[in-house]
Image (spheres, rainbow, N blue to C red):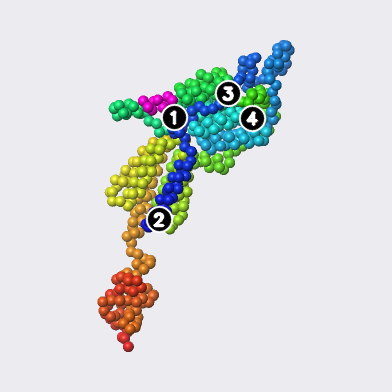
Amino acid sequence: MSKARLLGFACCLLAGMAVWLAQPHTESGMSVPFVADAFAATQPADAAAGKPENMPAPQSGTSKPEQAADSSAARPAAKTLSNHVTVLRVAGTINPATADFITEGLDQARDQGAGLVVIELDTPGGLDTSMRSIVRGILASPVPVVGFVSPGGARAASAGAFILYACHVAAMTPASNLGAASPVSIGMSGGEGAGDSKGADKKSEGDTMTRKVTNDAAAYIRSLAQLRGRNVDFAEKAVVEAISMSSAEALKDGVIDLVANNVPDLLSKLDGRRIKLDDGTVVALNTANPVIEHIEPDWRTQFLTLIANPQVAVMLMMVGIYGLFFEILSPGATLPGVAGLISLLLGMYAFQLMPVSWSGVGLMAAGTTMMIAEVFLPSFGALGIGGIIAFVLGGLMLTNTGIQAYDLSLPFVVGVAVSSAALIFIAGGFALRSRRRAVVTGKEQMVGSEGVVTFLSNGTQYADIRGESWQVRGDRPFAVGERVRVKAINGLVLQVVSVDSATICPTR
């Protein structure tokens, strides 16, 4: 391979690394959110009753008019909102695509003058920065937000519990659950050492970091519980002890505000509820005859959700490496190189969206490099086997969140490693066999060709070889019609030897 191609290949890799490093990364590689940041605190709205403002408004027609008058005087006037309801559906992990979808949905609801936003949740958890972005959007929303764990059997675990606690109203369907919000960190080892002081120090450091993250998470969700007037004890235990709770238990213990079967049932129960927004404005919900608008994720959100999956990211990375490898073996093919570079950049972008261990990424890259090197170096299988082992270990270390959608299974990692090794070895074998074959194109293919001397002119000899007239030279003069074989090429002159000494046409 020429120096120019090597330089071009190096430039492509450097460009990919530059794009990768330019993307924002999650600090400490935490897979589940739990570092409390700024939140907008509000005071309970109903001072006379000692209840949060988002509790149901008292029904009219009380038996004591004087008490109703006193209550009306103590309660601030509420602004009745529009009956336009925006419904956002979140099913799956909380990732940057999910955060963009919800924040853009909140902005759209505000611009359209919606009176309520309902976020239907069914999530096992997600990422720190994505959860914080969603919570900040909810806290700053001028439109009331209802978190609704739906449909039946859904859950709001981990990051979902934080989002539910941040909503102005929290609701669940029967047979749903929430909780299990303990933080899980990536890339921080809390395991024991080899019995020495250094291993003990590492274990202590890991324990300290775990306690730090857990305490921050507990303080964060505790502040959200206090903000919304919900059960603080369960919020803290969901983080510290990873406990969960069913919808019936959550309603009984004051973790949520109500239980509803579906969105229409939820809206019928919310009609007339008074809510105090974070700017101090008191509003009354108008959901008796709602106009419901469902906002679906656009193509960009769906695409980011697709690649924000460790299995897809690994496959993109491998396709990228395959493409560049084939481009090196067959310079000028172009398509493998272009497709490989695009796939590699997409894989790198997907990795930075997820909580990954960079040790795992390094091991996978090193394993792939060793498998490719096995094709070109006489290592007798050592590099290939070592590459497979490194790739498998890197895949197992890549993520460890406890969230199924973010963890790689052993069969998947082993299958990708073995398939990669087989593909690289087969392609390399074909390339080496083709390299050993005789040249059949270009001037090199002339060597060994046979022809017939056609005429002589002033001591210069010409022969017809492969349908072309060539000037030939040999160790002696040739006769016209004598068969010759090419031994070498010297510019435009062929060095030939006689195949036979028969004279077909005598010289005149």
Q: Earlier in the sequence, mark 2 or mark 1?
A: 2
Report the residue at 28% width, 48% height from top: 379
Q: Is residue 205 magenta?
A: yes
Q: Which of marks 3 and 1 is nearer the N terminus?
A: 3
Residues at marks 1 and 4 touching, judged by CB atoms closer than 8 Å? no
Q: Name the residue under label 3.
A: 41
Residues at marks 2 and 3 touching, judged by CB atoms closer than 8 Å? no
Report the residue at 61% width, 17% height from top: 51
Residue 184's disc is 1
Q: Can residue 438 be seen in this view?
A: yes
**Residue 459 picture location, percent across and down:** 31, 82
* CA distance separating discs 4 and 3: 16 Å
Q: Relative to residue 123, is residue 61 depicted above or below?
A: above
Q: Inspect the image, locate mark 4, and give the three-letter code of the amino acid beneath it.
A: Val
Q: Quadrant of the N terminus?
A: bottom left
* CA distance separating discs 2 and 1: 44 Å
Residue 143's disc is 4
Q: Mark 2 points at which residue?
A: 5
Q: Inspect the image, locate mark 3, and give the three-letter code of the amino acid beneath it.
A: Ala
Q: Earlier in the sequence, mark 2 or mark 4?
A: 2
Q: Nearer the viewer, mark 2 or mark 1?
A: 2
Residues at marks 3 and 1 touching, judged by CB atoms closer than 8 Å? no
**Residue 451 picture location, percent across and down:** 33, 75
**Residue 112 picture location, percent across and down:** 67, 35
Q: Look at the magenta stretch and give its main secondary structure.
A: helix
- Crowd around label 2: few <14 · some 14–19 · many ≥20 (10 Å): some
Question: Is disc 3 placed on a helix, strand or loop?
Answer: loop
Q: Does the magenta stretch include residue 304?
A: no
